[in-house]
Amino acid sequence: MGEHRKTLHIHFETDDLARTRVQHSPDPLWETLLSLHLLQGGTGQPVFGEWRSWVRQRLDRSAGLLLTLAPPRGYSVDFLTPGAGATDLETALEDVLSTPRPLLAADLTELAAARPLPSWASSLAAGEPAALHELGAAVRRYFSVAVQPYWPAIVGQARADRLQRGEIVLDGGIEAMLSTLHPQVRWQSPVLEVEYPVDQHLHLGGRGLLLVPSLFCWQSPVTLLDAGRQPVLVYPIDRRPGWFTGIAPVRGATALLGRTRAAVLEAICARPLVSTTEVAVELGISPAGASQHATVLRDSGLIVTDRVGGAARHRPTTFGSALLTVSAS
């Protein structure tokens, strides 16, 4: 008799199919968590090898806290990915840092069942302000090094995947889209079966399922352990082996503008008349932050801002375009 194949069973009711949707943009916390998994291993070397080498050279000691909470195999704490839908890190991080103490304690107890935890884990489980502050600082630091510089590439590939899913839905409906989501996913109505490290059942109960495209998700889709949280399935998208090199122009301009501001300029050069909100979504920053960076770029003569349909839309000046061109050479 063959070995038992472990499976995640996602149980749908009639209303769940109508409420299943694909998120319009990657989730910054899921990309953070899943990139932590990849960073600690050696899988996907042709796609992630250059990224892995680049990031490992630039992390500081604060990353150790996150590596403990998100080991490469087995359970990672659910509170690092409390939900989906936020398009910038700060909004998503607010949910993490406001996690109720019972959930913090439950997640860390689950993690401790598989491995010993450092002494700081008890302070975090109790929701002590100093521990939460340290967690927030670690997430911000790691995201700034490992995810944010590549956010435009991540968003671009995720949106291309979402358009493809939309065409499948228009041609064959939601069930056709679920059937073609990933090679390790099978739609056996009314259950979506996913090859998984453990046997797990998720009953949607009319809540619907949020599908989240992810660049850093590797080999198989993933969900939360706690079925009481928002039902979500994060799935891998196709990646091009050269995705990492697409950020080269931003690196050159970083010395003059700073990493985030250089990325804002690149986003505006790539999509003239892009709105402030669209820039914020592409880079995973808040609209207020995007507006502030755009103001500095405009005052420096690198962009021009027009009001179109009540929205602020930006386009590069000749000087702004030339700066990125020179930086990339």
Image (cartoon, grey):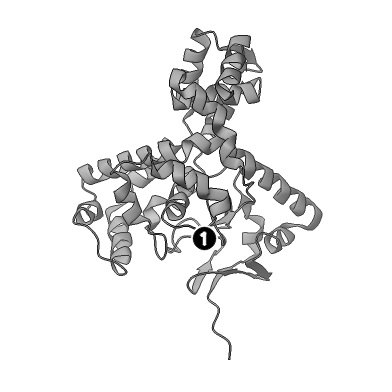
Q: Position of residue 168 (x, y in %)?
A: 76, 53
- Give 211 or 136, whichever is nearer the viewer: 136
Q: Is residue 308 above or below residue 68?
A: above
Q: Is residue 136 above or below residue 297?
A: below
Quadrant in which residue 9 is drawn: bottom right
- Give 83 or 2, whichever is nearer the viewer: 2
Residue under numbered circle 1: 222
Is 202 displayed left or right of 159 in the figure?
Answer: left
**For the image shown, how many numbered marks are present on the structure?**
1
Is 218 displayed left or right of 139 in the figure?
Answer: right
Q: Position of residue 234 (x, y in %)?
A: 55, 55
Element at label 1: loop
- Give 76 or 225, whichever is nearer the viewer: 76
The answer to whether residue 215 is seen in the rendering is no
Residue at screen point 49% across, 70% down:
197
Residue at screen point 63% across, 66% down:
185
Quadrant showing the N terminus: bottom right
- Give 32 or 48, whichever is nearer the viewer: 48
Q: Position of residue 103 (x, y in %)?
A: 32, 57
Q: Is residue 87 above or below residue 207?
A: above
